[in-house]
Image (spheres, helix red, strand yellow):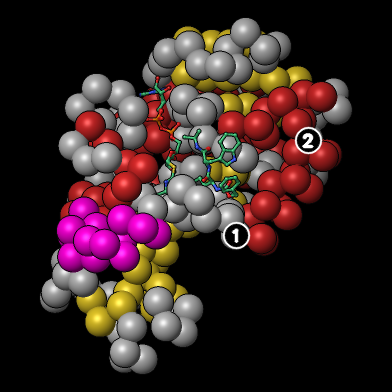
Amino acid sequence: MTGAGVSAESGIPTFRDKDGTWSKVDPMWFASPEGFAAQPADVTAWYDDRRRKCLDCAPNAAHHALAEIERRLADLGGTFTLLTQNVDRLHHRAGSRNVVELHGSLHVWRCTKTGEERDDLPCPLPEHPMPSPAGGLYRPGVVWFGEMLPEDALRASYEALATCDIVMSIGTSAVVYPAASFVEVAMERGAVGIEINKDATPITDRVDHAIPGAAATIVPELVRLAW
Ligand code: BV8
């Protein structure tokens, strides 16, 4: 499972590190249905700006190494499921195939009236907020606080957690639920738990192997040592 720390070395600010994405706005308000309802223009502009920055960034060595793990395990008849809290799609751009977007994507916009989703809207949007043809607005296609995660993403997650031999938590502060519970869900049934993160988190003392450091350094090293 990955978090914003995996994209940090691509130049995308994390959420909770100092100068992070959320040091500039109140996340519990901006990343919430109530915030969008009260300030649709500001919230739309904030997400549109983050989307533009993502498009200007490239996957880093951690993204590429995770895509390589998926390929190598497939060659051995194994499976690798990449659960990501990230909304930047850098894993897809690095070649990962079996990606589960737990919190949606900055590249998707959803009509508030019909639920229709688009990932082809111009960047930047011509106006904030962006009206939809059905007479609603296009809202960011991400999961806000207080919103359920997509059912298919939750199902794929719990299927992977129920069968994996190894569960890795990479670049996440492990504070946002239900994703923050995933490592322990897998470990409780016998998976080996590994954390790769710059700072200690609430799961650091609970995993089998806690490896402090930068994802773009450690994940490629993991691949080199394993193969
Ligand atoms: C839900 C999308 C049903 C939008 C985001 C149970 C207990 C307590 C609370 C709850 C609970 N269940 C639900 C809740 C409420 C809430 C929640 O968890 N609140 C927390 C804050 C306590 N959860 C929800 O509302 C979820 N919905 O469960 O529905 C429900 C609802 C209400 C009540 C009950 C049940 C929805 C959660 C999704 C919210 N949406 N974002 C957007 O992106 O704008 S969350 C946001 O945080 C992002 O998605 C982000 O991915 C996620 C986690 O952050 P991280 O990725 O971990 O990033 P962070 O900056 O925090 O950490 C980066 C880490 O990387 C750091 O540790 C750093 O050391 C490290 N790092 C930095 N650089 C590097 C590095 N590591 C390695 N290498 C580096 N180079």
Residue at (23% x, 32% y) in the render: 23
Q: Position of residue 89 (x, y in %)?
A: 41, 52
Instruction: Give the answer, above or below, for where 36 lies relative to 122.
Output: above
| Nearer the observer, 9 or 108 | 108
Asked whether the viewer can see residue 123, the reply is no
- Residue 70: horizontal and vertical position, in percent? 62, 42
Which amino acid type is marked by label 1? Pro
Depth-wise, is mark 2 or mark 1 nearer the camera? 1
The magenta-colored residue range is 33-46
Of label 2 and label 1, which has the lower sequence position? 1
Q: Position of residue 52 (x, y in %)?
A: 21, 56
Instruction: Tell me which corner region of the image, top left, top right, bottom left or bottom right, holds residue 113.
Output: bottom left
* Residue at (34% x, 68% y) in the render: 139
Name the residue type under label 2.
Cys
Query: Mostly what secondary structure, the magenta segment?
Result: helix
Please tell me which residue lies in front, 156 or 39. 39
Q: Is residue 21 found left or right of 66 in the rendered image?
A: left
Q: Which mark is residue 150?
A: 1
Q: In the rendered view of the protein, which quadrant contains the C terminus?
A: top right
Q: Who is closer to the viewer here, 209 or 103?
A: 103
Whether residue 60 appears in magenta in the rendering, the answer is: no
Which residue in the structure is indicated by mark 2? 164
Task: Classify 218 as above or below 34.
Answer: above
Does the image show residue 187? yes
Across and down, in percent, residue 21 comes to: 26, 37
> Looking at the image, which is closer to me, 88 or 23?
23
Q: Residues within 10 Å of mark 2 (few under 14, many from 20)?
A: some
Which residue is at a point 26% across and 62% down the rendered structure image? 38
